[in-house]
Amino acid sequence: SAARFMTVVVFSVIAAARHCPLRVLNLRGCRHVSDAALTAIGRSCGNLESLNLAFCARVTDNGIFGLVSGCRRLTSLNLLNCGNATDEAGCAIARGFPALQVLVLACCENITDRSVSAIASASNELRSLNLSFCENVSGRGIAEVAATCPALSELLLAGCAIDDHDVRNIV
């Protein structure tokens, strides 16, 4: 079946990366990629700098925990529409990726101010943060990021529940 083929392809990529200095991995739209693949990536891809998991609907907090265990050099992480990721994953990202510069959490409906606060307090290198359509992130959390991330130059907030007061606190 197609799902079985995709799983074999993904694990073949991971096995090849085990002994290779893979720095960029784009799995965007690979609907069958799950936490098992992310754990394998965490174990095998210590040189990984950029990971795109956009639209990987089977990714959960456990997969993010697996990544954090081994991908300490990650500078770019895209979790667009990974709706199963919660604040536990957001806090793990904040603690586990000290060099993170680009983070996309757009359309992650289970991400709240708790994640945003953790990211704000731990991410000195963060330059770009996409929280578009994160309906559970408030203006307070966004203002905290804007005030405490010294390198932040891009903040994407399309579809967020913010008002004029929140915008004034950001700028």
Image (spheres, rainbow, N blue to C red):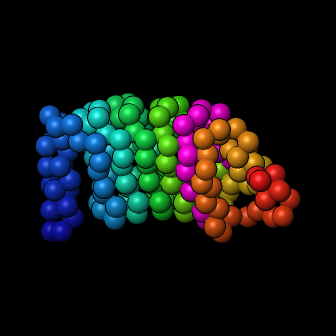
Say which quarter of the image contains residue 56: bottom left
Q: Residue at x 14, y 49 (%)?
A: 12
Point out the image quarter for the N terminus: bottom left
Q: Which residue lies most toward the right here? A: 165
Q: Is residue 141 left or right of residue 30?
A: right
Q: For the magenta stretch, what is the residue range?
A: 113-133
Q: Is residue 112 placed above or below 18 in the rendered structure?
A: below
Q: Is residue 112 left or right of residue 17?
A: right
Q: Residue at x 65, y 33 (%)?
A: 121
Query: Would you say residue 120 sits in the magenta stretch?
Result: yes
Instruction: Point out residue 10 in the picture as x, y percentages from the top left corner.
Output: 20, 53
Instruction: Point out residue 86 in the picture as x, y percentages from the top left corner.
Output: 55, 48
Query: Would you say residue 39 sits in the magenta stretch?
Result: no
Q: Residue at x 60, y 41 (%)?
A: 151
Q: Is residue 160 placed above or below 17 in the rendered structure?
A: below
Q: Is residue 49 visible?
A: yes
Q: Is residue 39 visible?
A: no
Q: Residue at x 49, y 48 (%)?
A: 102
Q: Is residue 20 placed above or below 131 in the rendered structure?
A: above
Instruction: Point out residue 76 in the picture as x, y percentages from the top left corner.
Output: 43, 46
Say which quarter of the image contains residue 73: top left
Q: Is residue 105 placed above or below 161 in the rendered structure?
A: above
Instruction: Point out residue 87 in the picture as x, y percentages from the top left corner.
Output: 58, 44
